[in-house]
């Protein structure tokens, strides 16, 4: 199976800030695409936060958020909706790397 986003095949960490297109990129991923890669995301709207959160949860990818001290988001209300709210971190890991 080929990854829809080739960068996920070789990168270990991605910082994604693509001026409102983050949801489109994240929604193109599947669970297996996340093996060996983590992603820092800047999310720019409430709609994007909702779409990203729902997709990552359905693919069993964890999302941690800066505004909660890098704890795991348990609902879409936890997810940043603008850069003012900080970043999100998507990973198959169950804790942030520095806590592992």
Image: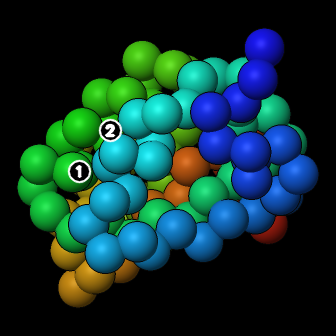
The structure residue drawn at horizontal position 56% and vertical position 49%, both measured from the top left corner, is 90
On screen, residue 73 versus residue 8, left or right, reads left
The image shows residue 49 at horizontal and vertical percentages of 23, 50
Structural distance between the alpha carbons of marks 2 and 1? 6 Å
Q: Position of residue 70 (x, y in %)?
A: 51, 64
In the image, residue 73 lies at what x, y percent?
Answer: 38, 46
Q: Quadrant of residue 15?
A: bottom right
Residue at 83% x, 43% y is 9
Is disc 1 placed on a helix, strand or loop? Answer: helix
Give the answer, above or below, for where 87 lies relative to 57.
Answer: below
* Image height of 48 relative to 88, above or below: above
22 in relation to 74, above or below: below
> Which residue shows up at 41% across the image and 35% down it?
27
Where does label 1 land, which residue?
Answer: 49
- Left or right of 71? Residue 97 is right
- Find residue 40 and report its horizontal and vertical position in percent: 56, 66
Residue identified by numbered label 2:
53
- Residue depicted at x 71% and y 30%: 3
Indicate whether 57 appears above or below 51.
above
How many residues crowd around disc 2 within 10 Å: few (fewer than 14), some, or many (20 or more)? many
Contact flag, marks 2 and 1 (Cβ < 8 Å): yes
* Residue 28 in sight in this render: yes
- Residue furthest toward the bottom? 84
Q: Is residue 99 visible?
A: no
Quarter of the image where the N terminus is located: top right
Q: Which mark is residue 1?
A: none
């Amino acid at each position: 199976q080929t990854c829809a986003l080739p960068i996920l095949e070789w990168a270990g960490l991605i910082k994604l800030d693509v001026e409102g297109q983050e949801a489109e990129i994240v929604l193109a991923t599947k669970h297996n695409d996340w093996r060996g890669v983590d992603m820092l995301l800047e999310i720019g709207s409430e709609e994007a936060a909702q779409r990203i959160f729902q997709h990552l949860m359905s693919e069993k990818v964890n999302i941690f958020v800066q505004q909660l001290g890098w704890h795991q988001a348990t609902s879409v209300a936890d997810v940043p909706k603008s850069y003012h709210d900080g970043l999100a971190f998507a990973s198959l890991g169950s804790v942030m790397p520095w806590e592992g």
